[in-house]
Structures are given as structure tokens and as C-alpha cells.
Image (spheres, rainbow, N blue to C red):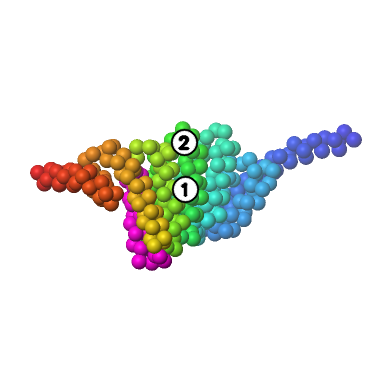
């Protein structure tokens, strides 16, 4: 009985070592496949490791898995904004960092995560620049992933400036969609305007947002006036004129504030001149025209 017990004890003591050796062999096998460029087979092999009780806490296994999926993304899914391989690569490198108590692999994993986070941002910009009315909303999810990862890497980051740049760009993209077909894409004008509001919520003195919001309202009013020939009777004419003037009136305070923030910007002076003229505030419009000429003369000197 004592002999049997001794044998059992030896077996139980040796089992973890055998298990660790087996995990190590599996990791090495996955790494060989990875180096050979057989990424799919390498992914299958490393997945078997991290799904095991011992492998799920292996920093090396997660590290290798991160690079396997990163290269799958680069090789096969770089043009796919919904790439699953990219998501898996980031998840793996996060797990590596989580299990790397000594920190030996942390920098490499952080560098890989940084590279992949930038790809989310770039994909968001590409979708935005394509100005496809159906797909443009997908840019938001990608930008949010970029922000989430940036804050994971640098928890003290302030993303306000990045948000403002993104919101301004999205506003421009939706405005361009609206301008392609104003009657059909009315909703995109609303979305464009909403992004400008979000900028001003973050920075009430943002000149670009104030100027763009004013131009947006003014152009909408001007477009409505162009529809007068389509009016069905005097009531319709009054309605269109009323809506147009209301929109132009909305434009005035934003352009006025933009001018107050930077009186030397000729764009704001020209904008005020035009808006005031259309509101029959002719004397004020003429004053703006004088300022415009003064700035033009100053620029020539």
C-alpha cells in the first residue's frame, strides 16, 4: 500500500511538469507554423493552447497569438474595416500584458496594440472620406474603438482635441452628402449640424464650428429660396420665404461670434456682409464691406 501511495504521489507531482512541457511544445509548434507563414494553421494551434487551463495564463502564448492574428489582419483583412483578426490581435496582446507580471513582453505588445489602434482611426477616416450615406455611420464605431484603445494605453489622455477634429470632419462629410442632393439627403444636413453642436459643447469658442454652423444655416435658407418657383400658391410662397429667413436669422449669431473671436478673418467679415444684407440690415452690411476692403488693402501692403 505504501508503495502504491508513493507511486501516486510521484505521478501527481510530475503531472504539472509534464503539462507545462506539453504546453511549451504546443507553443513552439504554433510558432514554427507562424514563422513559416502558415498563419491559419498557427492560429488553430495557438488557440488550442490558450483554451487550455494552463495555457490561458501563458503570457508567451497570448503574445504569439497576438502577432499571429496581427499578421492575418495585415495579410488578408487590412481592407476589411470589420476585421475579426484585428480584434483578436488586440485582445491577445491585452491578455499578454495582463499575465506578464515581470513585464518582459509588455513593450512589444503595447507597440502592436498602438499600430492596430491607428488602423481603426485610419479606417474611420476612409469611410468618412468615401461619403457613402449608408456606410458613413460605421466610422463612429471605429473611432470609438480607437479612443478606447488609446485610453487603455494612456489612461490619462485627454481626447477633447481628437474628438473636435473628428466631429468637424464628420460634419463636413455629412454636409457634402447633403449638398449632392439637398432634397433627398435632408437628414444629412441635420447630422452635420449636430456634429457642429457637439464641437461647440466641447469648445464654445471654436471658430471653425461657429463659422461652419453659420454657413450651414445660411446656405439652407438660400436653397429654400431657390425652391420658390416650385411653390403651390401664395401660402406656399409665404411658408418657403418664412423658413428661409428664419434659417438666415439663425446663421447671424454664429457668424457674429466667429467675427468677435477673430476680427481679422476675412471669411467672417464676408459672411456677416452677406447675411446682414439678406436680412435687410443694409447699413451694417455696408460697414462689413468697408472692413473687407480694408483687410484686402492691408493684405496687399
How many C-alpha atoms fall within 10 Å of the one at disc 2: few (<14), some, or many (≥20)? few
Q: Quadrant of the C terminus?
A: top left
**Magenta residue check for 225:** yes
Viewer-side residue, 44 vs 248? 248
Q: Evaluate whether residue 138 shows in this view.
A: yes
Specify the segment rendered in magenta: 208-233
Question: Which residue is located at x 26 percent, y 38 percent?
Answer: 262
Q: CA distance from mark 2 to mark 1?
A: 16 Å
Residue 293 place in picture, x, y as percent? 15, 46
Question: Which residue is located at x 27 percent, y 40 percent?
Answer: 259
Residue 73 place in picture, x, y as percent? 50, 55
Q: Element at badge 2?
A: loop
Q: Which mark is residue 154?
A: 2
Q: Nearer the viewer, mark 2 or mark 1?
A: 1
Question: Which residue is located at x 47 percent, y 36 percent?
Answer: 154
Q: Element at badge 1?
A: helix
Question: Which residue is located at x 37 percent, y 46 percent?
Answer: 250
Pointer 1: what residue?
Answer: 143
- Is 95 situated above or below 68? above
On the image, which quarter does residue 43 sit in? bottom right
Residue 281 place in picture, x, y as percent? 25, 46
Q: Evaluate whether residue 271 shows in this view.
A: no
Viewer-side residue, 239 vs 109? 239
Q: Does residue 87 appear left or right of residue 115 in this picture?
A: right
Viewer-side residue, 289 vs 146? 289
Q: Does residue 20 appear left or right of residue 70 in this picture?
A: right
Q: Main secondary structure of the magenta part?
A: helix
Residue 189 place in picture, x, y as percent? 42, 54
User: Which badge, 2 or 1, comes first in the chain's sequence?
Assistant: 1
Q: Quadrant of the N terminus?
A: top right
- Is 296 situated above or below 173? above
Amino acid at each position: 500500500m505504501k508503495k502504491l501511495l508513493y507511486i501516486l504521489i510521484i505521478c501527481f507531482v510530475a503531472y504539472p511538469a509534464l503539462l507545462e512541457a506539453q504546453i511549451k511544445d504546443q507553443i513552439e509548434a504554433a510558432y514554427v507554423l507562424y514563422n513559416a507563414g502558415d498563419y491559419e494553421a498557427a492560429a488553430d494551434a495557438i488557440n488550442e493552447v490558450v483554451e487550455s487551463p494552463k495555457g490561458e495564463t501563458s503570457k508567451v502564448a497570448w503574445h504569439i497569438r497576438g502577432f499571429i492574428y496581427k499578421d492575418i489582419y495585415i495579410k488578408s483583412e487590412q481592407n476589411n474595416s470589420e476585421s475579426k483578426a484585428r480584434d483578436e490581435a488586440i485582445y491577445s496582446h491585452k491578455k499578454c500584458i495582463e499575465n506578464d507580471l515581470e513585464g518582459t513582453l509588455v513593450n512589444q505588445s503595447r507597440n502592436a496594440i498602438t499600430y492596430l489602434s491607428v488602423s481603426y482611426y485610419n479606417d474611420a477616416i476612409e469611410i468618412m472620406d468615401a461619403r457613402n450615406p449608408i456606410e458613413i455611420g460605421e466610422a463612429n464605431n471605429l473611432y470609438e474603438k480607437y479612443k478606447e484603445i488609446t485610453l487603455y494605453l494612456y489612461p490619462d489622455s485627454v481626447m477633447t482635441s481628437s474628438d473636435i477634429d473628428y466631429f468637424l470632419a464628420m460634419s463636413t462629410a455629412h454636409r457634402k452628402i447633403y449638398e449632392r442632393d439637398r432634397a433627398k439627403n435632408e437628414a444629412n444636413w441635420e447630422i452635420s449640424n449636430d456634429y457642429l453642436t457637439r464641437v461647440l459643447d466641447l469648445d464654445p469658442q471654436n471658430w471653425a464650428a461657429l463659422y461652419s454652423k453659420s454657413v450651414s444655416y445660411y446656405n439652407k435658407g438660400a436653397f429654400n429660396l431657390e425652391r420658390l418657383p416650385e411653390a403651390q400658391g401664395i401660402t406656399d410662397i409665404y411658408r418657403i420665404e418664412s423658413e428661409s429667413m428664419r434659417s438666415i436669422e439663425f446663421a447671424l449669431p454664429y457668424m457674429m461670434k466667429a467675427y468677435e473671436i477673430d476680427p481679422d478673418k476675412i471669411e467672417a467679415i464676408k459672411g456677416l456682409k452677406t447675411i446682414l444684407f439678406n436680412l435687410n440690415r443694409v447699413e451694417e452690411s455696408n460697414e462689413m464691406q468697408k472692413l473687407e476692403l480694408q483687410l484686402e488693402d492691408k493684405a496687399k501692403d
